Image: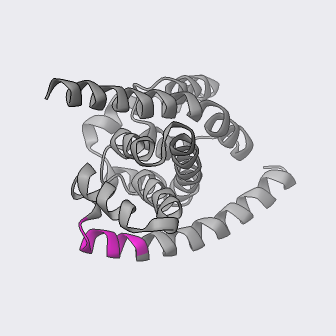
Amino acid sequence: MNKEDNKMRKLMNLCTVIGTILLLIFLYFAIKSQIFASQEKMAMFLERCGIYAPLLFVIIQIVQVVIPLIPGGISQGVGVLIFGPIWGFVYNYVGIVIGSIIVFFIARKYGMPLIRKMFKEELIERYIGWLNKGKKFEKFFALAIFLPVAPDDFLCYLAGVTDISVKKYIAIIVFLKPFTISAYSFGLVLIYDLISKIF
């Protein structure tokens, strides 16, 4: 590991600790208030928050990446419906990128034992073979992040136990995540609009 990666890792470790503490505090109150119970409850909660709604939505997105409580696509659709296509996308992007980076460092610190506790064995077995393919995993991971078909949150955890560099991981997340976020966000809104017109 070079000095630059080492400095970045120390900085991200600090951010991970601070972020995790804040997430746990928020998660406690979120579960108590049943914010994650449904899309409607999340929307109602955010609408009551006024000017703090964008910040809280970003926190919700970070939480749902680090601790997958609800399908990420659902919360992305909520963001676009509440904040509009431009700002909804921005808040989705910021929250998901931060969450994805936190996830990477959590996995790098705690490894496969944590992943096995968090995810179903069938899911792990489906993708674990990629861990032995070296650089091929990086290409597969980049493609999976680009296309809105793979379990992104799980793969971000899995990336944390590979040899992928911090810099390359962050670059993949920062530059390729927008495509997946756009597809989920606007695709769900389109479905919502179609259902609304039918019913």
Residue interval drawn in magenta: 26-34
State which quadrant residue 133 falls in: top right
Which quadrant holds the C terminus? top left
Give how far across and how far down residue 123 sits, in percent. Answer: 31, 36
- The reply, left or right, for residue 149 in relation to residue 107 is left
- Is residue 172 shown above or below 51? above
At x 37% / y 61%, what residue is drawn?
A: 47
At x 49% / y 23%, what residue is drawn?
A: 147
Depth check: give the residue in front, 21 or 60. 60
State which quadrant residue 140 falls in: top right
Depth check: give the residue in front, 79 or 142. 79
Q: Residue furthest right?
A: 3
- Is residue 48 shown above or below 108? below
Give how far across and how far down residue 107 sits, in percent. Answer: 51, 54
- Is residue 84 shown above or below 193? below
Depth check: give the residue in front, 83 or 19. 83
At x 57% / y 34%, what residue is drawn?
A: 177
Give how far across and how far down residue 96 sits, in percent. Answer: 52, 47
Give how far across and how far down residue 184 sits, in percent. Answer: 42, 31
Asked if residue 107 is among those painted magenta in the image, a careful observer would answer: no
- The reply, left or right, for residue 156 in relation to residue 44 is right
Depth check: give the residue in front, 45 or 105. 45
Asked if residue 28 is among those painted magenta in the image, a careful observer would answer: yes
